[in-house]
Image: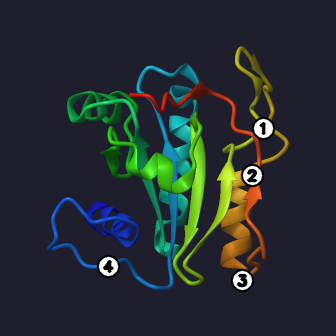
Amino acid sequence: MLIWLALLFTCLSPPPSSELPDPKADSLTVYIFLHDECVISQYYTPELTRLADAYKQHHIGFIGVFPMADQDRIDAFATAYQLTFPLIPDTSHHQVTLFDATMMPQAVVWDHRTNRLLYRGRIDDSYVRVGKRNLHPKSRDLENMVKKWLDGIIPDHLVETQAIGCVIDRRS
């Protein structure tokens, strides 16, 4: 199953191996920009695993994108936080630029039905700002977008919310 989720990545850029097939046309890919040393990225790992596991049977794949980490650090992060979805490096910032990602963690939702970006922003409203967290989030922005997509409700424009976390340094 993890191989299938990794295949979803292939629609937007060449895969690491040109032998990988394209993702299903009737699918959704959630890219999560993460940083192994970002406390807020670490905080969200249980929720991201829950979402990835809950929606994988609905042709919804999750891929963690690491703009600032090599494969060894990514592997250590996956092990430490028991992540169940594929994690990829993006040190060249190809995915960062493609999706105009600015923060870690930040969710980006790509719809393969319409071949366009539907959502970019926070996972939920757990963080008001760096260092200030809501104990009981009221808005589960990422999950709400996924549920709407499953119900056939596709926004006619890009939906954005403000992600709170660690800034992606585009100079590196």
| Marks 2,3: beta carbons within 8 A | no
Q: Secondary structure at mark 3?
A: loop
Three-letter code for the amino acid on which mark 4 is drawn: Asp
Q: Circle 2 is placed at which residue position?
A: 141
Dot 1 or dot 3: first in sequence order is 1
* Residue drawn at 48 percent across, 75 percent down: 59
Task: Give the Cα separation between the discs numbered 4 and 2.
Answer: 28 Å
Q: Nearer the viewer, residue 153 or 136?
A: 153
Q: Residue at x 78, y 37 (%)?
A: 125
Q: Which residue is mark 4?
A: 22
**Residue 7 in the figure: left or right of residue 147:** left
Tag 1: amino acid:
Asp
Asked if the residue at tag 1 contacts the one at tag 2, i.e. Cβ–Cβ closer than 8 Å, the answer is: yes
Quick one: label 2 or label 3, which is nearer the N terminus?
2
The mark lying in front, picked from 1 and 4, is 4
Q: Dot 3 corresponds to which residue?
A: 152
Amino acid type assigned to the residue bearing label 3 in the image: Gly
Q: In the orientation shown, which residue stands out farthest toward the right? A: 138
> Alpha carbon of mark 1 to alpha carbon of mark 4: how far?
33 Å
**Residue depth check, mark 4 versus mark 3: number of the one nearer the observer:** 4
Q: Residues within 10 Å of mark 4 (few under 14, many from 20)?
A: some
Label 2 residue SS: helix
Would you say the residues marked 1 and 4 are in contact, meaning their CB atoms lie under 8 Å apart? no
- Please state which amino acid type lies under the numbered disc 2: Asp
Q: Is residue 149 left or right of residue 15?
A: right
Q: Between marks 2 and 1, how big is the CA–CA gap?
A: 8 Å
User: How far apart are labels 1 and 3 at the CA level?
Assistant: 24 Å
Picture quarter with the N terminus = bottom left
Residue 46 x %, y %: 53, 38
* Element at label 4: loop
- Residue 125 got which mark? 1
Q: Residue furthest front?
A: 171
